[in-house]
């Protein structure tokens, strides 16, 4: 108990030291962050694209007994990233999504969103290996498109929720991460060896 | 034009080497101008947002561009390969703060092990006894926390660490226990992070964002938190941020005369000084020298030897990730809390020379994106997505990593030069890295990987996997860049075989000094920063003494 008091004192001291720690912790950051905080309104994707990207993310980090990319709203993270930091990847997504449906129609005579999860996995595996039959020739490689969505899905699952994914801390709950340690006020030596509980960013004691 | 203002000293770079020079020279009363290519960030500019800071690198080196090729015959690729920070305080701003003294034999590799084919081994022109007082100075300036008697294989010391060792986390205790079981002698990793309030800075909060982060509370010692506040308070420092040095000019007298630099609007400025200290790290320093050509130095300033940029060393790392049967709590506290040095000494019977320290390293397991991005390549999953990925991610709370910090052998062909075609945002040719591993590195890396796997077993690993992001798994694998940068302007007594002398002063240009990791003739099996700091205190001490004797 005395430990946690000293931690609190410490944070007060450090706020004085750094001059503006409180401001830092409470000031919204620009771009995707602000956009994501304001709404989950689509900024880049059409309704159809949104659904397709959501379906892909759902296969990259699937839902099982715990939430996956769909519950974490990874598609919203990607939409906001493409609107801001990763705007240069918009053509990659536009062409990639068109390519994905072309491959899907050719193989199963249906768009990607209407496939079974197993069929979707088959298509994505084909993209990943660069052997997707029917992938349109051009400047976007199937494997590059897959790699981009895979990486974005991971970011959307595990980055701070302020970026628009990791909804309700779903990703951090799945991987057992309480949140950024400094934002939580640091950890005591007892917490570092599991002798004292840790309070998570969503207020749970673990 | 107004009468030109000449400073006593211009220091290019404000990291470990430059920061100490600035601190010491301003304290001695010299008027110093310091140039740093990036912005002057404050503690309030730092946070532990992994996406912004680590993954997207929006804070420390957003405009860094380099090229890499395996050897002269291989094609180049363009990217960002070295872990550097461009803000005031340099790369030390986001260091993890491991603080080692090199062992005496590490300064005398050629004498200790003899020549090795294909390697350009050399002795340092100084002995451990000469640098020892300055190690002590650096430890006390930077408030290193450690246990002086902890490492029976470490360098000798005359004084204790200024601060006690940090408490560890669960993973550290398990690693220490395993090391003891195998007959090793584990001890707390010495770290320049406050374990109690020290130097006007607070104690560590153990929030877990050290390596690749700026400390939000200043508990981590950096030149930004230790040296530069003192220098600025002296009134002797003109600190110019967003100032990218592009050329050192030469006067008719053969002395360096000025530094031309570009501000962030690409506007050129020139600053004059009687002495010029280059401290741009082992990539940036030779990059600047090679861009500074003149009639007397057609191949780059201070490069009569032709060695500026050569003998680049990065270290190599043998890492093993593993899980234990309880929460490892790797996301708390420092990058490393425990190390052992029993395998450090050179022993040719092992099939290679040299070695290094083995330690807990939480870098790939401290935050979830790092775990997903750095950890996955070595994890034996069938697929890097789907249920395999999700099952892997769920191992995060029980995961830890150990790694050897291993000495790589210098090779003249491993080097930094100017890329012939790729330009940076200033229009300057980017540094081109040519780097492959000596066969000794590959043999050492495999051997240490096995020892790390043994240690994981002894720690009761549930699962274990070599961290493929680091290990040198096959003959063609090589580091494209480094976290530890050294060797490209080696110091030595022979002007034909070194770039600077034992005082880190150019053999060719008398008022030009190089004070950073560039001057390391060999890389040693420890993180380099404390040695860069100690060497800078040593050079500054010499500079001030010689100046008083009017000998410069």
Image: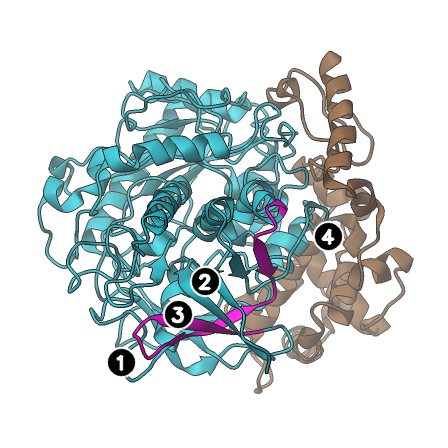
Spatial separation of the CA atoms under disc 1 and disc 3: 18 Å
Magenta residues (range) = B233-262
Residue at 30% from the left image edge and 40% from the top image edge: B525
Where is residue A59? Give x, y as percent.
67, 56
Q: Is residue B102 left or right of residue B204?
A: left
Chain of the residue that carries numbered disc 4 in the rendered image = A
Q: Earlier in the sequence, mark 2 or mark 1?
A: 2
Q: Position of residue B381 (x, y in %)?
A: 49, 48
Secondary structure under badge 1? loop
Residue on which disc 4 sits: A69
* Discs 2, 3: same chain: yes
Front label number (2 vs 3):
3
Apparent side of residue B502 relative to residue B400 in the rendered image (left or right): left
Q: Which quadrant is home to the C terminus of chain B?
A: bottom left
Closer to the camera, B552 or B450? Answer: B552
Placement of A109 over or under B500, stated as above or below: below
Where is mark 2, residue-wise? Answer: B81
> Does label 4 lie on the same chain as label 2?
no
Colour assigned to chain B in the rendering is: cyan
Residue A52: image quadrant is bottom right
| Of the pair B341 and A132, the residue shown nearer to us | B341
| Chain identifier of the residue bearing label 3 in the image | B
Marks 2 and 1, how far apart at CA: 33 Å
Q: Is residue B210 magenta?
A: no
Q: Residues within 10 Å of mark 4 (few under 14, many from 20)?
A: many
Chain letter matching colour brown: A
Q: Which mark is residue B296?
A: 1
């Amino acid at each position: 108990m005395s430990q946690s008091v000293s931690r609190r004192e410490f944070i007060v001291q450090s706020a004085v030291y750094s001059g503006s720690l409180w401001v830092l912790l409470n000031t919204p950051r620009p771009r995707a962050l602000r956009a994501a905080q304001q709404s989950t309104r689509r900024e880049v994707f059409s309704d159809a694209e949104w659904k397709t990207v959501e379906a892909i993310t759902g296969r990259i980090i699937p839902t099982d007994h715990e939430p996956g990319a769909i519950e974490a709203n990874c598609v919203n993270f990607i939409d906001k990233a493409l609107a801001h930091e990763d705007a240069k990847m918009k053509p990659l997504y536009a062409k990639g999504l068109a390519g994905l449906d072309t491959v899907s129609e050719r193989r199963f005579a249906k768009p990607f969103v209407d496939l079974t999860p197993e069929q979707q996995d088959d298509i994505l595996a084909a993209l990943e290996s660069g052997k997707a039959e029917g992938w349109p020739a051009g400047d976007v490689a199937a494997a590059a498109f897959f790699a981009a969505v895979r990486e974005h899905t991971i970011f959307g699952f595990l980055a701070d929720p302020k970026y628009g994914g990791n909804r309700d801390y779903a990703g951090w709950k799945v991987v057992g991460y309480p949140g950024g340690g400094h934002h939580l006020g640091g950890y005591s030596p007892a917490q570092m060896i599991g002798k004292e509980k840790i309070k998570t960013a969503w207020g749970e004691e673990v | 034009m107004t009468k030109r203002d000449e400073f006593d000293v211009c220091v290019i770079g404000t990291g470990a080497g430059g920061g100490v020079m600035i601190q010491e020279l301003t304290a001695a009363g010299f008027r110093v101008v310091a140039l740093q290519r990036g912005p002057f960030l404050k503690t309030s500019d730092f946070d532990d947002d992994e996406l912004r800071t680590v993954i997207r690198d929006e804070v420390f080196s957003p405009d860094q561009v380099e090229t890499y090729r395996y050897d002269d015959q291989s094609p180049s690729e363009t990217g960002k390969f070295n872990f550097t920070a461009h803000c005031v305080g340099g790369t030390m701003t986001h260091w993890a703060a491991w603080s080692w003294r090199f062992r005496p034999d590490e300064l005398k590799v050629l004498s200790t092990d003899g020549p090795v084919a294909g390697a350009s081994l050399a002795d340092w022109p100084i002995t451990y006894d000469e640098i020892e007082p300055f190690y002590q100075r650096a430890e006390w300036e930077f408030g290193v926390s450690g246990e002086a008697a902890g490492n029976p294989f470490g360098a000798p010391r005359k004084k204790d660490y200024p601060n006690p060792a940090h408490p560890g986390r669960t993973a550290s205790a398990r690693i220490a226990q395993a090391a003891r079981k195998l007959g090793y002698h584990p001890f707390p990793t010495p770290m320049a992070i406050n374990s109690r309030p020290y130097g006007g800075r607070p104690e560590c909060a153990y929030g877990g964002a050290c390596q690749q982060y700026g400390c939000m509370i200043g508990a981590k010692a950096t030149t930004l938190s230790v040296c530069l506040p003192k220098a600025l308070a002296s009134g002797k420092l003109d600190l110019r941020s967003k100032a990218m040095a592009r050329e050192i000019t030469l006067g008719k007298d053969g002395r360096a005369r000025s530094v031309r630099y570009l501000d962030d609007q690409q506007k050129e400025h020139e600053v004059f000084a009687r002495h010029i200290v280059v401290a741009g790290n082992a990539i940036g320093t030779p990059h600047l020298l090679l861009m500074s050509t003149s009639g007397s130095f057609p191949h780059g300033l201070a490069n009569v030897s032709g060695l500026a940029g050569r003998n680049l060393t990065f270290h190599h790392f043998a890492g093993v990730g593993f899980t234990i049967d309880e929460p490892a709590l790797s996301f708390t506290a420092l990058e490393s809390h425990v190390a052992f040095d029993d395998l450090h000494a050179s022993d040719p019977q092992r099939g290679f020379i040299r070695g290094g320290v083995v330690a807990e390293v939480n870098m790939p397991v401290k935050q979830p994106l790092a775990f997903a991005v750095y950890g996955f390549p070595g994890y034996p999953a069938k697929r890097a997505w789907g249920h395999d990925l999700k099952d892997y991610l769920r191992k995060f709370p029980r995961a830890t990593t150990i790694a050897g910090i291993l000495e790589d052998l210098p090779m003249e062909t491993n080097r930094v030069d100017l890329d012939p075609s790729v330009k940076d945002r200033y229009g300057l040719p980017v540094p081109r890295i040519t780097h492959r591993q000596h066969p000794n590195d590959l043999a050492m890396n495999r051997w240490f990987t096995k020892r790390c796997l043994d240690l994981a077993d002894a720690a009761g690993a549930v699962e274990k996997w070599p961290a493929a992001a680091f290990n040198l798994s096959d003959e063609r694998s090589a580091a494209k860049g480094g976290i530890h940068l050294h060797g490209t302007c080696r110091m030595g007594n022979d002007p034909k075989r070194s770039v600077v002398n034992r005082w880190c002063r150019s053999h060719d240009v008398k008022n030009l000094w190089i004070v950073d990791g560039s001057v390391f003739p060999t890389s040693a099996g420890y993180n380099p920063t404390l040695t860069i700091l100690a060497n800078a205190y040593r050079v500054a001490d010499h500079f001030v003494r010689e100046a008083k004797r009017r000998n410069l």
